[in-house]
Image: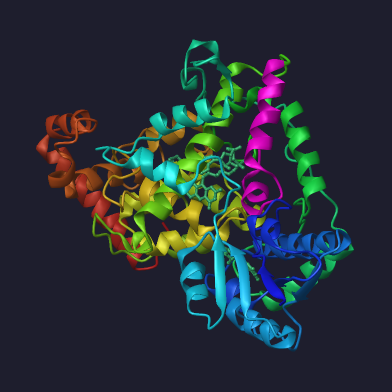
Amino acid sequence: MVKLILVLGDQLSDTLSALRKADKSTDVVVMAEVMGEAEYVPHHPKKIAFLFAAMRKFAMRLEQAGWTVVYARLDDPENAQTINGELLRRAEAFGASEVITTRAGEWRVIKSLEELPLDVTVLADDRFIATQAEFEGWAEGRKALRMEYFYRDMRRKTGLMMDGDKPAGGKWNFDHDNRKPAPGSVEYSGPMRFQADDVTREVIDLVREKFRSNFGSLDDFWFATDQGQARQHLSHWIKSGLPKFGDFQDAMMGDERFLYHAIVGLYINAGLLDPLEVCQAVEKAWQNGDAPINAAEGFIRQIIGWREYVRGIYFLEGSDYMDRNALEHKRNLPALYWGKKTWMRCLDKAVEQTREEAYAHHIQRLMVTGNFALLIGVEPSQIHEWYLAVYADAIEWVEAPNTIGMSQFADGGIIASKPYISSGNYIDKMSDYCKECSYKVKVKTGPDACPFNVLYWHFLDRHRDRFKGNHRMGNMYRVWDRMDADKREIVLADADRFLAKLDAGETV
Ligand code: FAD
Ligand code: DLZ
Ligand code: SF4
């Protein structure tokens, strides 16, 4: 009997468990570009174009390898426009009643597949270092789920940068050598850019036509769209970007959108690159003396540490995770996130590059757009949907823990031991944004003051009951409490005025 093998848009890996389980000679691979997936949040057109082009090329690759693939293009008149609708249509056409798939990376899709009146077998997604059972075993009984300890287990498991049972270089973590402020100039020419081929051009035209009102530019599309290109991009970055990756991992520059970042998240998350393969290539560069230990260790930690850890949390915490709102924040997401003018240069630059590239690096996400949303108290589900929509690497299993947990503290502290908030001082230290900003970062109150400076205290003041006992925040409260009472009043009044202007839709 024919079985349908469902391959989703972020499952473009030759080694996918569903494909391993299938019989090439009898089974049919089902892939579908559907409005249901393209519209549930208003994805950035570059993200949609990337996924559709990569899906089309992966389907061709499977066909060349001898698979029977039925592929629905978005504009096929017969397209049912949902994953389930497409499976039902193909089940009828092939007289099939069984579906094999690899577990989706979003609860929404997992739950929807459960509703199908077909016999659906869901296999584990083993394109990760840790199994879910391993993560749950690690998490069980722990008071705090801190990434650093989980990461050490993943180092031991993979043997990456290990000398026997000891970490290479005698330390697990070389972050002490990282986190340098923005450099004067960047020596790396940035990610490898690919000319759109025929498949990609056709997809771009389609996306331009169907998603013209979505936030985001489709101009100058340069992403890799197949495994071969993604590997070329990786080699290019390892040779030229990796050596300084660690040093400037946290730096931000107005005119350098990529600095030394790898821009591999979208490729790994879609399945074009394997996380272990990526880490092994980085380890090799370090072994050959082509990259320093702080760069190699820092990078590998992001992949086998953070990436694996947030995935574990997403599935451990369950499908209600996206609704968490521990700080009871209710403000609507300001229009500046969708490109409305702002005088705050850090936000203006982060949003501008997001619109143009469907990319911003971690510190821009955490300490600019995330920090601001947290300080002003945006409802977490709204900022979560924004991140899910606007970044090419955003799939919910990785985006939601980063947003709901790490960035917005909406899970009450499962991921972060304290909220990631800062005044303008941190942004000034790590970036070149403030020099040309209309606001003055050194000014603490009044109309010229950097808004982050007053919003920071406003946040601490309104959440005092929750955070005053947090030992990592004691210092902040001591500084606030020592401030002159009149000054405190002025700070809070300035912050309230700023929030009122924001809510009234004025340009801030
Ligand atoms: P690099 O800085 O070069 O890092 C290398 C790789 O490490 C990344 O590609 C990624 O695979 C991994 N990595 C690094 N940090 C994290 C992290 N915190 N969690 C998981 N993996 C990590 N990452 C996503 O892949 N998809 C998302 O939707 C996403 N949303 C985020 C939302 C917020 C609010 C924040 C603060 C972070 C988010 N991240 C997300 C994590 C991180 O910002 C991106 O992985 C990174 O910016 C991708 O760019 P890069 O490939 O150049 O990464
Ligand atoms: C993000 C996305 C988009 C925009 N479009 C599709 C699509 O048309 N077909 C598809 O199979 N997947 C798409 N995806 C990815 C899914 O929405 C979802 O994030 C993942 O399948 C979860 O594993
Ligand atoms: Fe951002 Fe404040 Fe710096 Fe302006 S002064 S760029 S608002 S941190």
Task: Place residue 55 in its image quadrant.
Answer: bottom right
Task: Place residue 499 in its image quadrant.
Answer: bottom left
Quick check: 410 left or right of 162? left
Residue depicted at x 70% and y 53%: 13
Q: Nearer the viewer, residue 225 or 287?
A: 287
Task: Place residue 221 in its image quadrant.
Answer: bottom right
Residue 190 screen position, x and y as percent: 73, 37
Quick check: 198 left or right of 46? right
Q: Nearer the viewer, residue 495 or 237?
A: 237
Q: Nearer the viewer, residue 442 or 402?
A: 402
From the image, give the main secondary structure of the stretch colored magenta: helix
Relative to 84, say whether 475 is above or below: above
Q: Residue at the left extreme?
A: 485
Residue depicted at x 31% and y 64%: 331
Residue 236 screen position, x and y as percent: 78, 34
Residue depicted at x 17% and y 38%: 487
Relative to 227, say whether 148 is above or below: above
For the C terminus, the image quarter is: bottom left
One can see residue 340 in this view: no
Asked whether residue 405 is drawn in magenta, I would say no
Quick check: 260 left or right of 471? right
Residue 478 screen position, x and y as percent: 15, 29
Residue depicted at x 67% and y 83%: 91
For the N terminus, the image quarter is: bottom right
Q: Which residues are magenta?
A: 262-287
